[in-house]
Amino acid sequence: MNDLELATHAAHEAGKLLKSHFGREAAVDEASHHDIKLALDKESQNLIEGILLGAREGDAFYGEEGIGGNQDSNRQWIVDPIDGTVNFYYNIPHFCVSIALRVDDEVVLGVIHDPIIGETWTVEKDGKPMLDGREISASKRDKLEDSVVFIGCGKDEEALRIGLERFRKASLRARKMRMMGSAALGLAYIATGRLDAYVESRISLWDIAAGKLLVEAAGGRVELTPATIADSWAITATNGRIPIEEVL
């Protein structure tokens, strides 16, 4: 099993776990004003880690719920075991599993799996972006007035303020605005032509590592700017035709 097949298998197994628990009462490990951590986040990550490091025992593992493996390795799996945990908790069927592999500080593959709809996006460096084995591409819309824009608002006061102001400005021009709750799925939707742009002032690496590679392979453009928190970024992504400065 090659790396992409392994990552896809791990994402699907985690997806089965999440789907089997969806709609049931979920145990909350931690709750803040704008976020929730579930026991299932850790269970999903442990399942993924076991599959990946069981097959690649010398690799490093970096997930939202902690690190593992050989942290000196040049091969690092970057994992979000539930991207869209709040959606999951409130029984909103819009969340996913995101897995990327970074080798020598470069992301070389990504997998995003939506267990409810049953869609799986896959991509490798210099390869074709795929949705369930079918090649995809970003939209050809080149005017903000024709576009659908996804704005993320983050989890702290500053990120919320910036996100809401961007939502206000872009909504005056874009055809429609969306706040969807999963950065990885937002990027996958740009790569598939369903959305045209996504912007957020603070997002974590595990949310976007797979999606960034997918969008760029599909003809889109992604710009990252380091945020004040380690491994957090301001992100702007478009279909490659909508100018990035128009959605900021």
Image: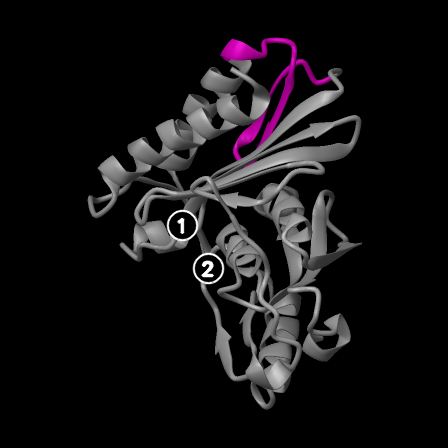
Alpha carbon separation for disc pair 2 and 1: 8 Å
Q: Which residue is mark 1?
A: 95
Q: Secondary structure at mark 2?
A: loop
Q: Secondary structure at mark 1?
A: loop
| Residue at point 46%, 16% (across, down) | 50
Q: Amino acid at mark 2?
A: Gly
Please check the rendered image and state whether residue 68 is part of the magenta-colored stretch, yes or no: yes
Q: Is residue 63 above or below residue 226?
A: above
| Residue at point 61%, 47% (across, down) | 214
Q: Residues within 10 Å of mark 1 (few under 14, many from 20)?
A: many
Question: Outermost residue, front direction?
Answer: 134
- Report whether 31 appears left or right of 188: left
CB within 8 Å, label 2 to label 1: yes
- Which numbered tag is attached to residue 114? none
Q: Is residue 56 above or below residue 80?
A: above
The answer to which quarter of the image holds residue 158 is: bottom right
- Report whether 47 appears left or right of 49: left
Colouring mode (rainbow / by chain / secondary structure / one colour): one colour
Spot occupied by residue 232 in the image (x, y as percentages of width and height): 69, 49
| Residue at point 67%, 13% (across, down) | 70
Q: Quadrant of the C terminus?
A: bottom right
Q: Which residue is mark 2?
A: 181
Spot occupied by residue 58 in the image (x, y as percentages of width and height): 65, 9
Q: Is residue 80 above or below residue 171?
A: above
| Residue at point 60%, 88% (across, down) | 173
Question: Outermost residue, left direction?
Answer: 24
* Magenta segment: 54-71
Spot occupied by residue 95 in the image (x, y as percentages of width and height): 40, 50
Spot occupied by residue 88 in the image (x, y as percentages of width and height): 34, 50
Indicate which disc, 2 or 1, sits on the residue closer to the N terminus.
1
Q: Amino acid at mark 1?
A: Phe
- Viewer-nearest residue: 86 or 173: 173
